[in-house]
Amino acid sequence: MEKHAIVIFGGSGDLASRKLMPSLNNLFKKRGGSLNFEVISTGRTLFSKADYLEKIDRKGEYKQSGFYSRVDYLQLDPYIPQEYEKLAKEFKERGITKVLFYLATPPSLYPIITANLHKTNLVDKKSRIIVEKPFGYDLNSGREMNNLLNQVFVEDQIYRIDHYLGKETVQNILALRFANTIFEPIWNRHYIDRVEITAVENMGIEKRGGFYDGVGALRDMVQNHLIQLLALVAMEPPVHFSQKEFRDEVVKVYNSLKPLQKADVPKSVIRGQYIEGERGGVIAKPYRLEDGVAHNSSTETFIAMKVNISNWRWEGVPFYIRTGKQMPTKVTEIVIHFKHTPHRLFSCREECPEQNQLIIRIQPNEGMVLKVDMKIPGGGFDVVQVPMEMTYSTIGESVQDDAYVRLIEEAMWGDATLFTRSDAVESSWNYFNPVLEYWRENPSTPLYGYPAGSWGPLESEEIIEGGHKWTNPCKNLTNTKNYCEL
C-alpha cells in the first residue's frame, strides 16, 4: 500500500485548525488503517510537535482516536526555497510515495509555494494539490492563477475545492433529478416559473475582517458556491456520472448564462451591507466597526441577483440567487416555483395558495418538501396548500455534514468529479466580471444598509418579477423549535 503524505501549508492558521484537522481526524476514524497517510503541517511559527498538537487538539479528541500519532509539524518559511528541502528529507525518511499538497494560505502565496515546490523538485506525476477559493478575484486574476498552477501541475493534478459540492444534500440534487422519472418531464421552462437559491448566515464576519473586506459576498459565495448550486439545478444529465462528463455539463451551464451588460447591473444586482441591528436579543455592531474593516468600506455583505440562462430548457425562467451575513438564521435552500394551472377551477377559503413548490433544503433539517394543493374536507371545493415532507430525519438517517472528509479522500484517490475545473473558473468569472467592473467604474452604485437580523435590503425584492417576493424560510422567529422547519 502506498504511503500518502498530506502537506498543509498554513498549518497554524484558522482553516487548518477549524476545518482541516477535524476532518482529517474523522477520515482517520472512518478509514482506520485502510488508508495509509500522514499529515505534515507547515507554518512560519516555531512550534514543537507537542505544542502544535496541544494548540489544535485542546479537547484531546485526536489523542483519543489515535490520529495524534499521524500528525507532525514542520517550521517552514514558504518564501525561502531552501526551506522546502526539509520536506524532501521528511518524505525520504518516512517512505512517502505520494503527496497531496494543501494550500490553506491566502491566495497571494499560491504562486510562491508552487514555484518553490517546482524549484526543489517536490512535484512528480503522483503529486496532487488542493487550492481553496477564491480562485482569483476577477477574470484576469482567475486566468493568471490557472496559468500559474499549470506551469507546475497538469490539470488532472489540480483540485480546486468547493466544500459545497462535498455536502450530501447538494449531491442529492443530482439523485433527485436524474434517479426519478417524475421530475424530468416538468424540469423546464414549460412548467417552472422561477427558481430561488438562498445561502445566508446568522453571523457576521467574525475575525475575518482583514480577509473579507477585500473579497465581499460576490467573490466569497456567489461566484463559486451559489453558481455551483445553480448549475446542479440547470444542468443536462451527463451521459455517465464520471468526472469529465459531469464537469462538462457544469461548464455548459456557465457558458449558457445570458451575459450581463453593464447597463443591466443596477436592475439585476442589489448589494447591501449590514448595519447595527438586533438578532436573537443581542445588538450586533455594524460591518464597518468589525475588526480589520475600513471605516468607509463599500464591501458588500449581501448580494441578490437575477440570472438568466439562454438555452432550450431554461429560456425565460429567471434564477434568483442571494447570500448575506447577519441574517435571521443560517439556511441554504433551493425553491423551485412551478407555474400556475392554466385555469383555476377551485375556490379558496382564505387567500389562494401560491404555485406548487419544491423546496430542496441543503441545511439545516436536510431534505425536501413538495407543496401541493388539496381539498379541505367537508362541503364545497376549497383548496389549501399542504407540504409533503421528505427529510433525512424522517427515514432515520442523519447527514454527516463534513464535506471536507469526502473531498480530501477523493483527492487522495484521484477522483476530481466534485472539484472545479479550470475552464469552469474562467467561465464563471466571465459572467460575473461585468458586475465587478460596473462597481469599480461607478463607485456611487447604491450599497443599501440593512439591520443585522433582517432579511437584507428591501430593494432586493424589486428584482423579482411578477410581484413575487423572496421565500424567507423562518416564519416564526420566537419559536426556536420551528425556527427553520420546512
Image (cartoon, rainbow, N blue to C red):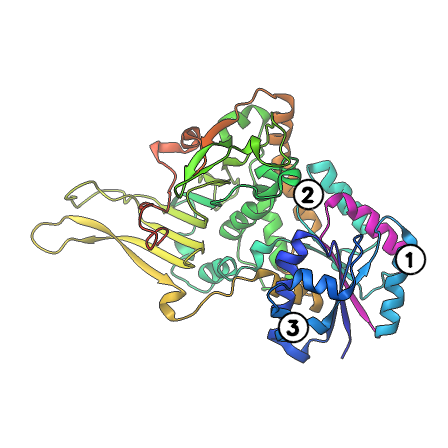
Which residue is located at x 35 percent, y 54 percent? 485
In front: mark 1 or mark 3?
A: 3
63 to the left or right of 446: right
* Contact (Cβ within 8 Å) of mark 3 with mark 2: no
* Contact (Cβ within 8 Å) of mark 1 with mark 2: no
Write down the residue under mark 2: 426
Q: Earlier in the sequence, mark 3 or mark 2?
A: 3
Q: Nearer the viewer, residue 53 or 337?
A: 53
Amino acid type at image mark 2: Glu
Vertical placement of 297 versus 244: above or below?
Answer: above
Tell me the quadrant of the picture where the N terminus can be found.
Answer: bottom right
Q: Which residues are magenta?
A: 95-121
Amino acid type at image mark 1: Thr
Write down the residue under mark 3: 63
Image mark count: 3
Write down the residue under mark 1: 120
